Image (tube, grey):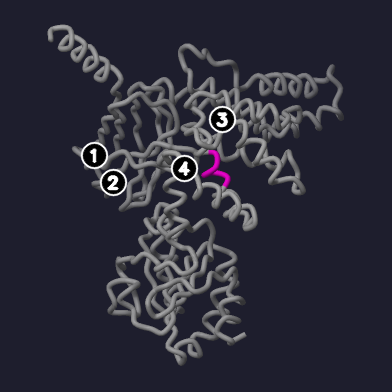
Amino acid sequence: MKKIYTLSAVLAAFALQAQFTVTVQTPADFKDQDAILYTLNGSKDIIVTKVQSKNNTWTFKYPNNYMGMMKVYFPTTNNTINFISENKNVNIKLDIQNNKVKDVAYLDEANELMTKQQEGSQKKELILPALTQIKEYYKDNTDFGKALKSEIDRLSGASGSVDAAKHPFIAYYSANKSKFLSDTNNKVSQDDIINFLDKSNDMLESSGLLRPVLVAYLNSGGNTNVAGSVDKLLDRLKVETPRGQTVLSELIDIFDVYQMDEFKTKYLGLAKNLKCTINDRLASTLKSNANVEMGAVLPNYKFQSASNTTAKSIHDVKADKKVIVFWSSTCSHCETELPKLLEKYNDLKAKNIQVIALSLDIDKTSYSNKIAAFPWINDSELRGWNSSYVDTYNVHATPTYFILDANNKIINKPDHVGNVLEYFQLK
């Protein structure tokens, strides 16, 4: 018994050592009480905890080891700050103007270094190619030529090497971003990417690199052999493993975003037929897709502050048919499509068809100005892509449409407003 007790004490002590805190400070006039801490899994933000401020300071306690991207979101003011964790305390101070983040000061060593690395990388990607072209027109022995060469040399080494023992995540992120996502690196093969995805440690899922590296992998295989490329990758990773399932989930979402329906259908079917234990990442993709399958009852949504209705939720709206549209006042396609829906709105109402528009806006003024012209039901959480209905309804782009029957079953998923009007024979 004594040995068991001692082991428990050691494990408890280790857990305490693994814990770190994230502290965010703001000026006293910042009008937000709540803040939400997120980690990252592939391209999905994962909620960790929600805390309230004490003297305009938010302190999050993270109980486990974690190296990767994190963010804090202030839901009332729609402010988001991004940072990294290397399993050490994070300290951030915000400069606020009119309830918006004006500047972010990272007070811990890791985030300060990461900021410098990213600034150097951006300059290298944006400025260095232009300076290299200009150099051809100036001789090295002129004052300007010498200065130009000096700046090129400086930017060429701007990112600098990072001590992997001291800053493992920064070293991992910088090296692999440069290798796999740099515009100047054309030597990476599909096999190189497969080896990286197969052999990488857990920082791959928390780095934010997984989605863009997968896109680079698909692009490297060309448009004519997408299925071959994906099958080759999944065969190597073993789709039953956690890494294989996370990659499969990301691929399904990528095919959704780029409207590659044939491949989405194929690999979503593969995911549905897996007989192994499903990890959280793939489970969330399966659930959000199941929510919006043809014939499924669209999950209900309780309105926040809806206009042009007394109904409390989507299911409370009584109509023979409903058109659900996810949109934003900053979406150029919405600017083109919604006026066409507006032209036919009276015809839709005459057929007892109701339009329910859920906005992914952030700015209240922009949203309010736009919906003044829309006589249908409008609602928004004013949280942009942090809105709760993004995951629930598998929304990857705006506008996104669903047509429901009187029982809230999905009977059509139009790609464009023209398809909506054609379905109702109003085109």
Return the mark for residue 275. 4
How many residues crowd mark 3 within 10 Å: few (<14), some (14–19), many (20+)? Answer: some
Q: Position of residue 185 (x, y in %)?
A: 73, 29
Q: Which residue in the rendered view is the most extreme toward the bottom?
A: 350
Q: Is 218 on the left-hand or right-hand side of 132?
A: left
Q: Position of residue 54 (x, y in %)?
A: 19, 38
The answer to whether the residues at label 2 and label 3 have Cβ atoms under 8 Å apart is no
Mark sitting earlier along the chain (1/3): 1
Rounded to the nearest angstrom, the CA distance separating label 4 from label 3 is 46 Å
Rounded to the nearest angstrom, the CA distance separating label 1 from label 2 is 8 Å
Is-magenta flag for residue 175? no
Rounded to the nearest angstrom, the CA distance separating label 1 from label 4 is 49 Å
Q: Tag 1: residue type?
A: Asn
- The magenta stretch is 247-251
Q: Residue at x 63, y 52 (%)?
A: 263
Nearer to us: label 1 or label 4: 4
SS category of the residue bearing label 1? loop
Of 46 and 155, nearer the camera is 46
Mark sitting earlier along the chain (2/3): 2
Q: Tag 4: residue type?
A: Lys
According to the image, label 3 marks what residue? 119
Q: Image quarter for residue 238?
A: top right
The answer to whether the residues at label 1 and label 2 have Cβ atoms under 8 Å apart is yes
Return the mark for residue 56. 1
Q: Tag 3: residue type?
A: Glu
